[in-house]
Image: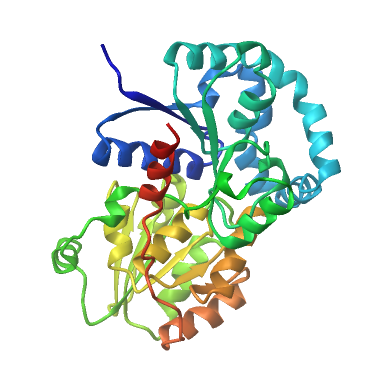
Amino acid sequence: MNDKKRVLIVSCSVGHGHYYTAEAIKNTFLLNYHHIEVEHIDFLNFIGIFSKKVYFDSFYPIARYLPKLCKFIYYNTDNVIGKKIFNLITNFSKKINTNRYFEYISNYQPDYVLCSHFIPADIIKNYSVKHKFNFRVGTLMTDYAIHELQKVSRDIDYYVVNDDINKELLSTGVSQKNIIVSGIPINPKFMEKINIDDILVKYRIDIVKKTIVILPSVQEIIKVEEIISFLFSSKYSMNLIAIIGSNGKLYNKLKEYMPPKSINYQLIKWSNNIDEYMRIADIIITKPGGITVTECIYLGKPMLLINPIPGQEEYNAKYVINNGYGLKAYTMEEFKKNIQLLFSGFNVKKESLVKNPNDIICGHIISSL
């Protein structure tokens, strides 16, 4: 008979961050807490196709092609009235799309459910009365500010990034015992001790030059090809590594670019070893997603932030800038100015994080069982 306590982690792959934080916690349990049974599911696999396309699949197209609409929705639901309107609009969909989700939960019989997106947590707390679930629920913040819709209930656990969110939740009546200032969990690979010299050799890095790593971006306010063209024409010698992601058209275009002799240019579609590229970087050019920002801070890597998704990523960027972890560039002119500041030794805070968010979250869950 299996007498292990069960932890169910529920993500919602509307954004990569929600999935990756859930996987980070799952992998931490599997690596370090063998007495706990853990499972990770994607909420989107348990709802109807129509609701999935309308409420979730539309997120990235709106963020990329209609950023003003994305911004409007974010800020106009970030208040009590906007939250009520949002819940009225989505109420019917939540009610008819929960049967398979609740059936899975009932069969798995978890002792704790951790949600890395607010909607799966909201549905458990506010739409499952007839099921009489008897387990604790937690929700995990994946950005550096909290949105009104993420304030699901006063009697669940909130794993938050900083004291500012802690204070905001306290002001709404959430008890301090239900708020855990953990930070954002990251892939355990980032916490492993590895030999940097070996990575430098592996990727043929010229150690005399600075290494610039460009990470994928959803929006294209500043295009990657503009960035690379500018760097090619600049006075700086560098190792330039551009990781493109799933954009095959962009990859084929950038493959034709011919760098000057002073630049060691590497174009990467994708890699399962993103942490290795980030470890050898002197500057990381990236959009301000909560996970990537946390990884950079953990590694002590200066960031130049581009192309934020309106709303949460703008708050992430403010956190980075206000705490001295990097600079922003929302226009090409701003990029040219700030990349030069970083090359010239601009004073960017490089202290890496000391605490381990993954162990804090896992430890609290275990203490709650």
Q: Quadrant of the N terminus?
A: top left
Q: Closer to the camera, 103 or 213?
A: 103
Residue situated furthest bottom in the rendering: 344
Q: Closer to the camera, 26 or 93?
A: 26
Residue at 58% over, 61% down = 163
- Residue 261, percent from left and from top: 27, 78
- Residue 198, percent from left and from top: 13, 64
In the rendered image, the vertical position of residue 238 relative to residue 3, given as above or below: below
Q: Quadrant of residue 319?
A: bottom right
Residue at 45% over, 80% down = 348
Residue 18 falls left or right of residue 152: left
What colour-coding does the image apply?
A: rainbow
Residue 343 falls left or right of residue 105: left
- The answer to whether residue 231 is visible is yes
Residue at 47% over, 55% down = 183
Residue 296 falls left or right of residue 314: left
Q: Quadrant of the C terminus?
A: top left
Q: How many marks?
A: 0
Residue at 27% over, 68% down = 280
Q: Closer to the camera, 313 or 329?
A: 313
- The answer to whether residue 309 is visible is no
